[in-house]
Image (cartoon, helix red, strand yellow):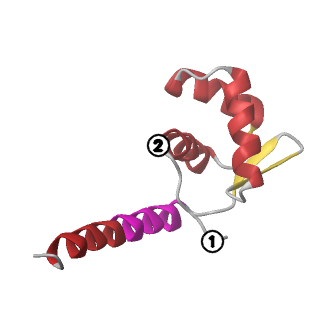
Amino acid sequence: MEDLRLCDSEYRFMCLVWEMTPVRSGDLVKAAYERLAWKKSTTYTVIKKLAGRGFLRNEDAIVTALVPKEECQAAEQDYFMESTIQASLQKFVPA
């Protein structure tokens, strides 16, 4: 998988998955409602989206994380560093 970056809401959801994996999808819906105030439909939409991107698997109503939390965090750190350095260079070169 090339892009391991998640938006904020996806990351918060994946934190639930990482904490509970493997987890029944119904239990994940309850946890997402309690912790994120998400409706059932929102949770299933995000499960489908993240499964399609290879972050998790939903098989026989069991959701399992496929990508470790540390890999996603490292990808976000790399992106932040690259964008920060690029912005600094763009300001430095004209000066």
Q: Amino acid at mark 1?
A: Glu
Q: Amino acid at mark 2?
A: Asp
Residue beneath disc 1: 2
Neighbourhood count class around disc 1 (C-alpha, 10 Å): few under 14, some 14–19, many 20 upward: few
Q: Position of residue 83 (x, y in %)?
A: 34, 67
Give above or below for 86 relative to 26. below
- Does 79 lie within the magenta span? yes
Say which of 91 and 50 sits in front.
91
Q: Position of residue 90 (x, y in %)?
A: 24, 72
Start-end of magenta stretch: 69-80
- Helix, strand or loop under label 1: loop
Residue beneath disc 2: 8
* Cα gap from disc 1 to disc 2, whole angstroms: 19 Å
At x 30%, y 72%, the residue is: 86
Do the residues bearing badges 1 and 2 touch, measured as CB atoms within 8 Å? no
Neighbourhood count class around disc 2 (C-alpha, 10 Å): few under 14, some 14–19, many 20 upward: few
